[in-house]
Image (spheres, helix red, strand yellow):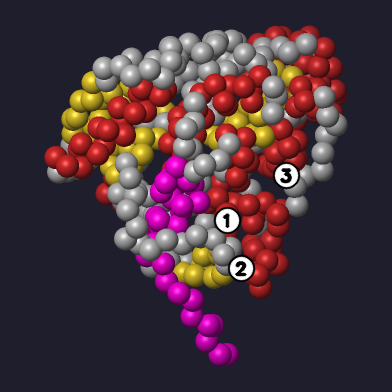
Amino acid sequence: MAPRTPHPVLDSRALNRATLARQLLLSRAEMSARDAVGHLLGLQAQNVKPPYYQLHARLAGFRPAELAGLMESREVVRMVTMRSTIHTHTADDALTLRPMVQPARDREVNYFRKGLAGVDLERLAELARAFVDAEPRTMAELREELLKEWPGADPQSLSVAARCRLPLVQVTPRGVWGRSGQVRLTTVENWLGRPAAAAQPVDEVVLRYLAAFGPASVKDMQVWAGLTRLREAFERLRPGLAVFRDERGVELFDLPDAPRPDADTPAPPRFLPEFDNLLLSHADRTRVVAPEIKGRTWTGNQSHCTLLVDGFLAGLWRQDGETLTIHLFHDTSAARKEEIAAEGEEMVRVMGGRLEGPEGPEDPGKNPGSNTGEPGKVSVRFGSIHG
């Protein structure tokens, strides 16, 4: 057989700059918050405030009130989609991406089948839908309602089954900047006042994924979506895609006209919140995370806030009021520290308040503090992390 046509090789810096460009992290985009949420295919949102910080790092002139207004007007919503995690999506994507990943949510229920012995899942979905559509409910309230029908079932398994079988959204004020509220749930159709929609075609989502995260492998997208068997979609699209390989020979796909900046393009410091999309959406994350610091952004199942320097993961940070503490993985120059500090000071001035630690899935949201945008005295402290 004739050898396969060789494809251009993209090293880690080339992949880094391409991905940062798609993620709006090489330079802040002149784009609305709604358009950015759509371009990025949603924002990881296990905690309340990270979506706001994600947009601050990516958009010129962003203020938290813009995303908060979209939440209150129901133009964006918080719901479980990719990887069985909460994302902030546009209303259109909420109605069409959830059906695309529904097979994965159905399989997830199977892991809890022991606690669901004797439970009719179709009946469960009907009862749960009627209960949460009558008025938004907490998960505890929903669980108690389902236990009336199946008192011998495992309560957690009933909760998981309801969350997986139904497209549940967290209603406001949960998720609104500066406000607090318990997690209360209803169906996305009820919240938006629109009927269920067909799933976005997989081929279309592949193209959107490459626009936001490419160049990428089939496995990269499968990790992002929490789906398998996407090879067929890439093969259908192959004639219209650019094809590359990484330094390990893995085949990468991309949109032909998508930006792939020079590897030496300057990348300014960027402060990212916990669970940022950039760090969770590829199987191979060496385009952002050097192998020697892999795993150092997590403690248990909690992700830490991260700092990019020259486009790569360089440290962790914590905000407490107007004090910003930065822990670097490696020493850096005084000039670089000044650049990092300037970016951090601007973030604290714009965002105000504090970025809290992890919030439980049913804990009330915490008021992030004032957001006047007025200049204040910001204290930036540097430390280092060893080992």
Image quarter in which the N terminus is found: bottom right
66 is higher (above) or lower (below) than 84: above
Q: How many labels, in total?
A: 3
Q: Spatial distance from mark 1 to mark 2, Cα to Cα?
A: 10 Å
Mark 2 burial class by Cα count in 10 Å: few <14, some 14-19, many 20+: some
Q: Which mark is residue 152?
A: none
User: In the image, is residue 166 above or below residue 13?
Assistant: above
Element class at badge 3? helix
- The residue indicated by pointer 1 is 210
User: Looking at the picture, does residue 247 appear above or below residue 146?
Assistant: below
**At 51% from the left edge and 65% from the top edge, which residue is drawn?**
252
- Do residues under tags 1 and 2 come within 8 Å of each other at their CB atoms? yes
Res 152 visible: no
Residue at x-position 57% and y-position 65%: 257
Q: Is residue 30 left or right of residue 311?
A: right
Question: 169 or 93, which lies in front?
Answer: 93
Please report contact status of discs 1 and 3: CB closer than 8 Å, yes or no.
no
Q: Which residues are magenta?
A: 1-28
Check disc 2 and report the residue beneath it: 241
Q: Amino acid at mark 2?
A: Leu
Q: Is residue 315 left or right of residue 371?
A: left
Point 64% across, 56% down: residue: 207
Q: Amino acid at mark 3?
A: Met
7 inside magenta stretch: yes
Residue beneath disc 3: 100
| Disc 1 from disc 3: Cα separation | 17 Å
For discs 1 and 3, the disc positioned in front in the rendered view: 1
Q: Nearer the viewer, mark 2 or mark 3?
A: 2
Residue 120 % position (x, y)? 83, 26
